[in-house]
Amino acid sequence: KCKDLITRCGGEFGSCPSGKCCNKDGYCGATYEFCSVSEGGCQSELGNCRCSNEFGSCPEGQCCSKKGYCGSTEDYCSVDKGCQSEFGKCTSNATTVDRCGSQFGGKSCPAGQCCSKKGYCGTTAAYCSIDKGCQFGFGDCKCGKGLGKCPAGQCCSKKGYCGATAAYCSAEKGCQSGFGDCKCGTGLGSCPADQCCSKKGYCGATEAFCSVDKGCQSEFGKCTSNATTVDRCGSQFGGKSCPAGQCCSKKGYCGTTAAYCSAEKGCQSGFGDCKCGTGLGSCPAGQCCSKKGYCGATAAYCSAEKGCQSGFGDCKCGTGLGSCPAGQCCSKKGYCGATAAY
């Protein structure tokens, strides 16, 4: 049984099965701990190694294919086949490229070079600057101060290259928001100071990005509500409350998802809404979980006849409040439960 579950590699064990990676300790697997060269010590000669924003770069001298695997054949290294130069070397099918671009048969420059406005390959600003007409699709193009902005839908990476993957667009990886889109949120990081993270996960400073009513994510940048900025909330931050309809997370951020609102994740009920129920947890002591899954202490939350969820907080019973669910008792003080005290 164990032999079927754990596969060894290296030495007498040989290579891993297809689709598996061999880590530095000689075990086969398919997750980050096995397939990452930098973190797992993936041994490329004994199985597949992965490359991407998540897995990192290939070993020196290898290429990262379009699908995110390391190798050294044309299928991995050819620019025309989608080789990812951000995570390894890449090669152009042509050894020498005299001219490039749309005017010259759509030829691309070798990896690491840019195709100028006039169709020449090179690596200086004269070839690579977007402001000077660098041709996208036929080589690299550089963005940033003195070089220009990326086309719509693309991001300017920390190193000044245009692209649309997390390696280029992630705020926490240094995406330059002044020269293209930048993405924010879980796994992508927070926007630069004074910028907001929109509902769709982009950094910006206009109402479309910053309005709480439009879904601004305050955990990943500033947000505004009725022209008032809500940076942090809760007992750790001067007792500030979130705007109506939002929840104050355990760490003091306003938002509307389970990460902010879940009672079991530490939502602070005194500084905004908190949600309860299956997958969200129980309300704090003395509070009730309403039919719609919110924590509170008034009849709207606690009344048994209004659907109070007794498994996730207190529920009240009696005149004007209704009867307890089947199998439960209504105590002298008007609470539902199933123990001798009730």
Image: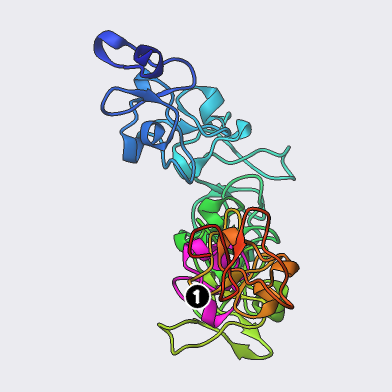
Q: Magenta span covers which residues?
A: 248-276
The x and y percentages for residue 230 are 56, 84
In the picture, measured across the screen, residue 35 lies left or right of residue 192, that is left
Of helix, strand and loop, which one carries label 1? loop
Total of numbered circles in the picture? Answer: 1
Residue type indicated by callout 1: Gln
Which residue lies under the disc numbered 1? 268
Is 178 or 335 nearer to us in this picture? Answer: 335
Instruction: Locate residue 330: give its quadrant.
Output: bottom right
Tell me the crowding category of disc 1: few under 14, some 14 to 19, or many 20 or more residues within 10 angstroms, Cα based: many
> Would residue 258 be counted in the magenta stretch?
yes
Is 273 or 129 nearer to us in this picture? Answer: 273
The x and y percentages for residue 228 are 62, 91
Q: Is residue 184 visible?
A: no
Q: Is residue 332 visible?
A: yes
Instruction: Locate residue 27: give its quadrant.
Output: top left
